[in-house]
Image (spheres, rainbow, N blue to C red):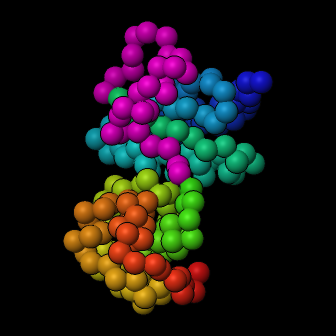
Amino acid sequence: MIHRLPAELSETLRQALAGHDGVADFAILPLSGDPAVVVVLSEMGCVLEIREELRAVLDRAGSDAEPAVLAVTELPAHHLDEAWFRREMANSPSASRYAAPATALEHELAACLARVLNRPRVGVLDDFVDLGGDSVLAVRFVTAVRDENDLPLTLIELFGAGTVRRLAQLLTAREPIALSGRG
């Protein structure tokens, strides 16, 4: 059974995208499941921020849908369909879909990173730098991970791994980890 995005939620997303400084053009695909959005970014646009802002808009509208956002240089002239969108999402470095933490360590790291970056949530595939992370925030995050969970982590490892998932894999590969977080 295919569940389409209700018209009122689609209109809510349209309004949010039309008023967004980071979006030059967009298309909302009427796909099955969660909303799929294709955007042409302006100079001020960040695909991850747009995804999270759309998630907040949907949350305020009472929906738990998770938007997937694909950034392109221009909207394709051909008909946009689900197969095209999924293919592009799989092959594009400028695609953003929230991925929830799956392990206890991923939960701890994502929660810690969200606190340090002052964000409501962080997905396990979201890149630290794309989230607005810089050297000062990196020091805060690495210190918090060490203090809260007694996990050995360096700045070089954080910038090298980039995502919560790769950090968790790196830390898990070292030795068994017992989480002692306060989270």
**Viewer-closest of 146 and 37:** 146
Q: How many marks?
A: 0
Residue pushed farthest top?
78
Q: Is residue 161 shown to the viewer in this render? A: yes
Which quadrant of the rendered structure holds the C terminus? bottom right
**Viewer-closest of 37 and 169:** 169
Q: Position of residue 32 (x, y in %)?
A: 66, 27
Residue pushed farthest left?
156
Q: Is residue 29 above or below residue 172?
A: above
The residue shown at (39%, 20%) is 75
The residue shown at (43%, 49%) is 48
**Viewer-closest of 61 and 165:** 165
Q: Is residue 180 above or below residue 19?
A: below
The stretch drawn in magenta includes residue 87: yes
Q: Position of residue 132 (x, y in %)?
A: 34, 61
Tell me the magenta residue range.
Answer: 73-99
The residue shown at (42%, 67%) is 168
The stretch drawn in magenta includes residue 138: no
**Viewer-closest of 9 and 178:** 178
Q: Is residue 59 above or below residue 8?
A: below
Task: Describe residue 65's horizontal placement relative to residue 106 as left or right.
Answer: right
Q: Is residue 111 shown to the viewer in this render? A: no
Q: Position of residue 85 (x, y in %)?
A: 48, 25
Which quadrant of the rendered structure holds the N terminus? top right
Quarter occupied by residue 160: bottom left
The residue shown at (61%, 44%) is 66
Q: Position of residue 92 (x, y in %)?
A: 35, 34
Q: Is residue 88 above or below residue 151?
A: above
